[in-house]
Structure formats: structure tokens, C-alpha cells
Image: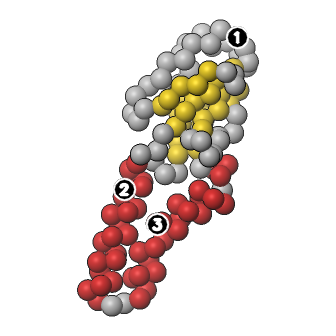
């Protein structure tokens, strides 16, 4: 559901596909990598040294598809429990996963998308 894009040196744009590697060949140093989804941007990641081997970069997102669907299913389950029992505390708990995503989306945009070099 969420589309992420990699911007290399502010000129090349690549779409990321979930669980598929993206090969980027760049010959000029430094290489500036920014990941975005249209509204959010990751902190710039710079590669300043020439690598002798392949550099692997981990892209993380607070609302990847697994977390989004897991939060929705958990919320629906708690809403169902609320309708059966009538306990209002369960209604409050049912909204926590969605409120957490809204909090990260609007109030912590710097932490919504992350990019970091993986160590071998």
C-alpha cells in the first residue's frame, strides 16, 4: 500500500518494491541517498568512501504493510471484544495502534522512514 522511492544525488528516482533488492550503480562520490514516500523524507545518507564490495542499505518504515495490517486486525479484534463485553477500556485499547501510527506520521516525520548502512 505504501510506495517508497529512493532518490540518489537529487537526480535519479527509483521505486522500491517490498522484499526486492534495488541495484544502484553510482560512480561519483559522495553518493547522497534519500528515501521518500511523497510526504516524508528520511535523513540523507551519504556514502563518502569508495566501497570495494557491495553496500547494503536497510530501509525501514514505521507503517510497512505488515504493521499496518497487523494494527488494523488487532483494532478490529478489540472493537469486536468491546461490542461483546461493553467494557469501554477495550474501546480505548482498540484505538492505540491507529493512534500510534498517526502520532508517528504527523508528529515524528523524521523517524517515519529510516535508511542505514548494514554492517557485515
Name the residue that disc number 2 marks.
69
- Whether the residues at callouts 3 and 2 have beta carbons within 8 Å, the answer is no
The N terminus: image quadrant? top left
In this rendered view, identify the residue nearer to me: 6 or 58.
Answer: 6
Label 2 CA crowd tier, 10 Å (few <14, some 14–19, many 20+): few
Q: Residue sitting at 63 percent across and 59 percent down?
A: 106
Name the residue that disc number 3 marks.
97
Q: CA distance from mark 1 to mark 2?
A: 40 Å
Q: CA distance from mark 3 to mark 2?
A: 10 Å
SS type, badge 1: loop
User: Residue 76: which quarter of the image?
Assistant: bottom left
- Whether the residues at callouts 1 and 2 have beta carbons within 8 Å, the answer is no
SS type, badge 3: helix
Answer whether residue 118 is visible to the viewer in this image.
no
Sequence order check, earlier mark of 3 and 1: 1
Q: Give the x, y percent position of residue 114.
A: 60, 41
Q: Give the x, y percent position of residue 34.
A: 65, 32
Q: Give the x, y percent position of residue 49.
A: 71, 16
Relative to 54, is 71 on the left or the right?
left
Name the residue that disc number 1 marks.
28
Q: Residue sitting at 46 percent across and 80 percent down?
A: 92
In this rendered view, identify the residue nearer to me: 106 or 19.
Answer: 106
Q: CA distance from mark 3 to mark 1?
A: 43 Å
Above-or-below relation of 4 to 108: above
SS type, badge 2: helix
Above-or-below relation of 103 to 46: below
Q: Residue sitting at 46 percent across and 73 percent down?
A: 95
Q: Give the x, y percent position of residue 58.
A: 53, 34
Sequence order check, earlier mark of 1 and 2: 1
Amino acid at each position: 500500500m505504501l510506495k517508497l522511492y529512493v532518490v540518489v544525488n537529487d537526480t535519479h528516482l527509483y521505486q522500491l518494491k517490498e522484499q526486492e533488492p534495488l541495484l544502484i550503480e553510482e560512480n561519483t562520490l559522495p553518493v547522497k541517498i534519500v528515501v521518500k514516500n511523497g510526504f516524508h523524507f528520511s535523513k540523507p545518507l551519504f556514502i563518502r568512501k569508495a566501497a570495494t564490495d557491495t553496500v547494503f542499505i536497510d530501509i525501514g518504515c514505521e507503517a510497512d504493510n505488515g504493521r499496518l495490517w497487523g494494527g488494523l486486525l488487532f483494532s478490529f479484534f478489540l472493537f469486536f471484544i468491546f461490542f461483546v463485553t461493553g467494557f469501554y477500556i477495550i474501546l480505548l485499547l482498540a484505538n492505540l495502534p491507529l493512534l500510534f501510527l498517526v502520532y508517528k506520521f504527523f508528529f515524528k516525520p523524521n523517524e517515519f522512514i529510516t535508511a542505514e548502512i548494514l554492517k557485515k
